Amino acid sequence: MASPIMFLTLLFSAASLIAISSANFNQDFQITWGDGRAKILNNGELLTLSLDKASGSGFQSQNEYLFGKIDMQLKLVAGNSAGTVTAYYLSSKGSTWDEIDFEFLGNLTGDPYTLHTNVFSQGKGNREQQFHLWFDPTADFHTYSILWNPNRIVFSVDGTPIREFKNWESNGVPFPKDQPMRIYSSLWNADDWATRGGLVKTDWTKAPFTASYKNFKAEACVLSGGQSSCSPSAPAGSRNSWLSEEMDSVSQERLKWVQKNYMIYNYCTDTRRFPQGLPTECKLP
Ligand SMILES: *[C@@H]1O[C@H](CO)[C@@H](O)[C@H](O)[C@H]1NC(C)=O
């Protein structure tokens, strides 16, 4: 028969495993603005942002990351969300910052959200790709992920890759790889441009608008006191580590499917916008 001590030891190690794997917004994030409009609920399991006529709200991660595979589940503003923007992104600081963006542009009830993505390196963006989604992002939580390693950035939705930005530094395209980034999110009013280019205004009679977050998960390199410590799922360099993860052929096919059926804007095909020629990375495989 197992001794009571053994039983207790088992119990404690099971508890600490759970503590490691379940994210806690109280521990991993801080609310940065919105004067009470952002809330951490259910002992840190749920975070909600809200927006009314007076203000939006936002939060940021406690940690700074230098590469990571970061998942967050979001449930977006339901009903008439026209004019609202929910931004969820990674960003470094300073005038030559790096940034990896998801932005969700609201719409009239029944009209599709636009998922806007961008990548900034050394302060320069202009790399927008926009998508509609193959589900209603306001009905349930869905997982939005960023894989950021030294070779690529992959944006995924529920495990389906929607965009890949490769490291083309050898061709002179700067790639985010030296500046640690924090995770930021905010819900704000952008009815001067967000919905149909600003034609549809926010309906304040429907305020407050709310977006919800749960199940944050990061396998990442965390910076603290100038030291970086990584949490690889498998030893670095091994095939399964996020640090060296590539897109396999199944992922490539799914990416093509999304780009063919759901992409509504791609800077790489906008020749009118770049009369001097498309950006270098658009001409590479
Ligand atoms: C809103 O719906 C219209 C009509 O379907 C669509 O053209 C547009 O891309 C949608 N999104 C935004 C943000 O306007």
Image: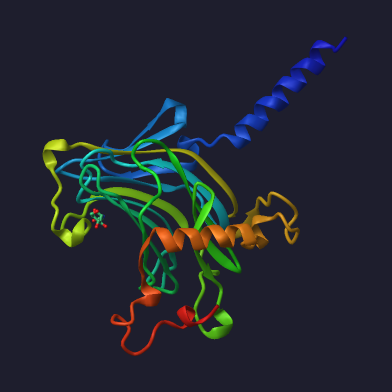
Against 5, residue 161 (above or below) is: below
Q: Residue at x 19, y 62 (%)?
A: 197
Closer to us: 187 or 161: 161
Q: Is residue 124 visible?
A: no
| x then y, percent, for residue 263 | 39, 62
| x then y, percent, for residue 149 | 59, 63
Against 155, residue 269 (above or below) is: below
The answer to which image quadrant residue 114 occupies is bottom left
Residue lying at the far right in this picture: please name it. 1
What scheme was used to colour the molecule? rainbow
Against 98, residue 103 (above or below) is: above
* Residue 15 located left or right of residue 202: right
Q: Residue at x 32, y 46 (%)?
A: 58
Which corner quadrant holds the N terminus? top right
Q: Please tell me in which quarter of the rendered image ligand 1 is found.
A: bottom left
| x then y, percent, for residue 172 | 52, 84
| x then y, percent, for residue 78 | 28, 38
Q: Residue at x 41, y 64 (%)?
A: 93
Which corner quadrant holds the C terminus? bottom right
* Residue 67 located left or right of residue 90: right
Q: Is residue 219 visible?
A: yes
* Residue 77 located left or right of residue 92: left
